[in-house]
Amino acid sequence: MVTGASDGIGWHIVARLARAGAEVVLPVRSRPKGTAAVERIRAQTPGAKLSLRTLDLASLESVAALADGLLSDGRPIDILINNAGIMSPPTRQTTADGFELQFGVNHLGPVALTTRLLPLLRAGRARVTTQIALAADQHELHWDDLQWERGYHPFRAYCSSKIALGLWALELDRRSTRGGWGVTSNLAHPGVSPTNLLAAQPGMGRPKDTRDVRIARLLSRLGLLLGTPETAALPAVYAATDPSAVGGGFYGPGGYRHLRGAPAAEPLYSRLSSAEEASRVWEISAELAGVASLAKE
């Protein structure tokens, strides 16, 4: 299962997995976009085994509905790639549950989904790969105000959400190891490529493309410094499928400053190194996401 697969990096992740013969579930917020994504993949890979489900990571009710449906089906999950995310809404917005939008979508949504699916992940002895970002090596986790109710800053809030997510994913691997869950959890990041993260999104308060995404598109077309959405998908595919990728590992582009290049292991960011902070994130996040009873060892 791959979240955020209707376009961009997520689409390329699914296309790679489908070409390798995997059966892939695509949980999408927009059914028309999801249908178009499936049709594009099947045009390249006839007979690709793909199925759509509905998921809005900004709604814990939607997350629970997806998980309940999959649990009812009872089929083990072998790979989960937590890829979906949003970046830097210009003004503070909230999820359906009242959480700051980036903290809710980038962090609490994946926490709730993964935790609710633990029975299927354990049955499949799954590998869970969670996409963070270069931003997880910048600024800090905003412990004093996780919801950014005071002094909202778009990019710092994005960094905070990605640091929280990275800490939580590493704690998942630790708890699986201690508890014998059989689930392997690792991290990936895509480097930098021109995706829709900073494109025009009127519903998120961004009426036009940002300057950063316009520059990224130009550099990517010229083959300078940055990758493409297709190459940016490779670290997550590697982390999720390669036998040498390990639990607690971190994988990204191996080129200049990890902006682009072939997948490679990376040193863990210092902001993600504290097991104590990871445990704290695990406990707080489980409470906020309504899955505390499911997250116990």
Image: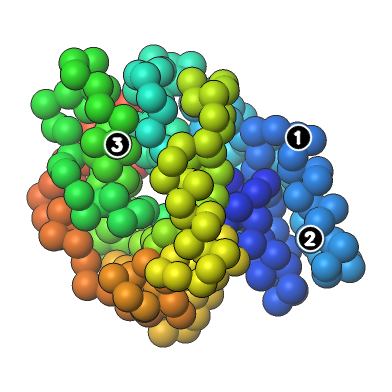
Question: Quick one: label 2 or label 3, which is nearer the N terminus?
Answer: 2
Q: Is residue 217 left or right of residue 11?
A: left
**Amino acid type, residue under disc 3 in the picture:** Phe
Q: Secondary structure at mark 1?
A: helix
Q: Quadrant of residue 62?
A: top right
Image quadrant holding the N terminus, namely bottom right
Q: Which residue is mark 1?
A: 31
Q: CA distance from mark 2 to mark 3?
A: 33 Å
Give residue 81's position: percent from left, percent from top.
51, 57
Q: Mark 2 Cα within 10 Å, few/some/many (few <14, many 20+)?
A: many
Occupied quadrant, residue 246: bottom left
Tell me the kind of residue under disc 2: Ile
Separation of disc 1 and disc 2 at Cα? 15 Å
Looking at marks 1 and 3 on the same chain, the residue that comes earlier in the sequence is marked by 1
The picture places residue 55, in percent across and down from the top left corner, at 62, 34
Task: Give the residue at x 31% y 45%.
Answer: 162
Residue 77, image x, y percentages: 59, 58
Left-right relation of 224 to 66: left
Q: Between residue 42 and residue 78, name the one nearer to us.
A: 42
Secondary structure category for the residue under label 2:
helix
- Using the image, tell me which numbered label, if any, was put on residue 155: 3
Q: Count residues near mark 1 (Cα–Cα under 10 Å), then give few for <14, some for 14-19, many for 20+.
A: some
Question: Is residue 184 in sight in this rendering?
Answer: no
Of 156 and 241, nearer the camera is: 156
Q: Estimate how packed mark 3 is, as few (under 14), some (14 to 19) or many (20 or more) residues with alpha carbons within 10 Å.
A: some
Which amino acid lies under the numbered mark 1 shown in the image of this protein?
Arg
- The answer to whether residue 111 is left or right of residue 77 is left
Depth check, mark 2 against mark 3: the one in front is 3
Residue for badge 2: 41
Q: Secondary structure at mark 3?
A: helix
